[in-house]
Amino acid sequence: MTKESLKQWYETVAQHMPHLSKPQAFVLALWSLGMVIARSCFLAKPVGVKENALRERLRDFYREASAKKGKRELLC
């Protein structure tokens, strides 16, 4: 897996789903490529992040905004 192959995968996702924002398309590319190779941790090296950080990013993709790390719901 190389950065170039990840870039090509991202471009394919973005082309087929133009309504997604760039970050959404990137995470979907990571997620789908991770499913293809069966373990998302293999993607950490080409992306240049630690395995656990990448897993957290993938989890954040489907969490509600208020449940994401660093986001807190204000109670008045």
Image: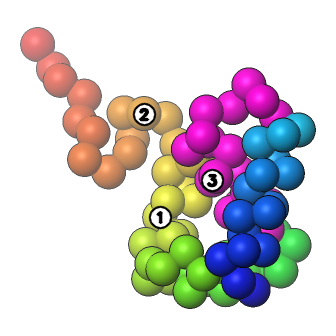
Q: Position of residue 62 (x, y in %)?
A: 60, 44
Residue segment shown in magenta: 17-33
Q: Above or below — where is 15 with respect to 27?
A: above
Q: Position of residue 39 (x, y in %)?
A: 73, 81
Residue 27: assigned label: 3
Asked if one can make out residue 34 in the rendered structure from this viewpoint, the answer is no
Q: Amino acid at mark 2?
A: Ala
| Secondary structure under the numbered disc 2 in the rendered image | helix
Give whichever of discs 1 and 3 has the lower sequence position. 3
Q: Is residue 53 left or right of residue 38?
A: left
Residue at x 50%, y 51% (from the top left corner): 60
Q: Amino acid at mark 1?
A: Glu
Residue at x 84%, y 40% (from the top left corner): 15
Residue at x 74%, y 25% (from the top left corner): 19
Q: Position of residue 74 (x, y in %)?
A: 17, 23
Whether tag 3 and tag 2 are in contact, CB under 8 A, the answer is: no
| Secondary structure under the numbered disc 3 in the rendered image | helix
Q: How many marks?
A: 3
Q: Quadrant of the C terminus?
A: top left
| Secondary structure under the numbered disc 1 in the rendered image | helix
| Front position in the image: 68 or 28 | 28
Q: Quadrant of the N terminus?
A: bottom right
Q: Amino acid at mark 3?
A: Val
Magenta segment: does it hold 20?
A: yes
| Front position in the image: 2 or 61 | 2
Residue 56: assigned label: 1
Give the residue pinned by disc 2: 65
Whether tag 1 and tag 3 are in contact, CB under 8 A, the answer is: no
* Dominant SS in magenta: helix
Residue 36: assigned label: none
Give whichever of discs 1 and 2 has the lower sequence position. 1
